[in-house]
Image: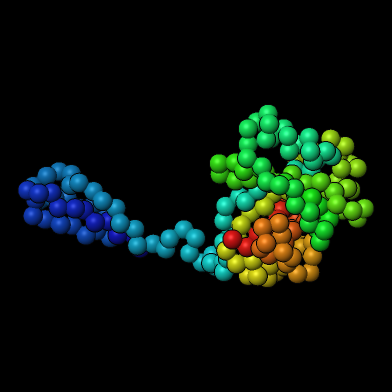
Amino acid sequence: INFVLYSVRPHCSLVSLVVTGLARCAWHSLPSVRAVSLTAPLGQGVPQSLWKLGRLNHVAIAVPDLEKATALYRDVLGAQVSATVPLPEHGVYTVFVELGNTKLELLHPLGEKSPIAGFLQKNKSGGMHHICIEVDDINAAIVDLKEKKIRLLSPEPRIGAHGKPVMFLHPKDCDGVLVEIEQA
């Protein structure tokens, strides 16, 4: 049932609570109206998730020449860039480019089995590799995503470039985008 509460005008002493229809203030033909809905809010009945998406942490770009790409962002575009960091467990070298509200992660292959080497074989001049979104509870997110039939690219989270647990989601389950989730 929806209830509508008609507010009292300063000079009107009658308050009307109406289930259906329209009540009128005794001294005026139309009272001022404030609707108050007592129906269930939109989203009620939708189970609340035990985890939430946070901010966009970074956009990762695979580059065939890490020094050239670093120079572009640092010397041409004037961005602050990190030192090159090898991550052998992920098969990449990384450089982070600081932006006002997020970062770019430049990726270059480290070793023959690097996933970035395969990406660059298909995309000779490089390109966007993945996006990384923070989550407030990566373990709850992983359980929930598995239940929702989203394929994960490793059986357990691994420690990522920021020293926090990360998990990659299969691009075929994410509209063609490789998504990395990272513990906030």
Placement of the N terminus among the 4 image quadrants = bottom left
For the residue pair 183 and 15, the one nearer the viewer reads as 183
Residue at the (21%, 53%) spot, across then down: 6
Residue 66 shown left or right of residue 32 in the figure: right
What is the x, y in percent for residue 53? 58, 58
Residue at the (65%, 31%) spot, across then down: 77
What is the x, y in percent for residue 10? 9, 49
Placement of the C terminus among the 4 image quadrants = bottom right
For the residue pair 143 and 33, the one nearer the viewer reads as 143
As drawn, the residue found furthest toward the top would be: 76
What is the x, y in percent for residue 142? 68, 67
Query: Which quadrant holds residue 80?
Result: top right
Residue at the (19%, 53%) spot, across then down: 7
Q: Is residue 59 visible?
A: no
For the residue pair 92 and 143, the one nearer the viewer reads as 92
What is the x, y in percent for residue 135? 60, 60
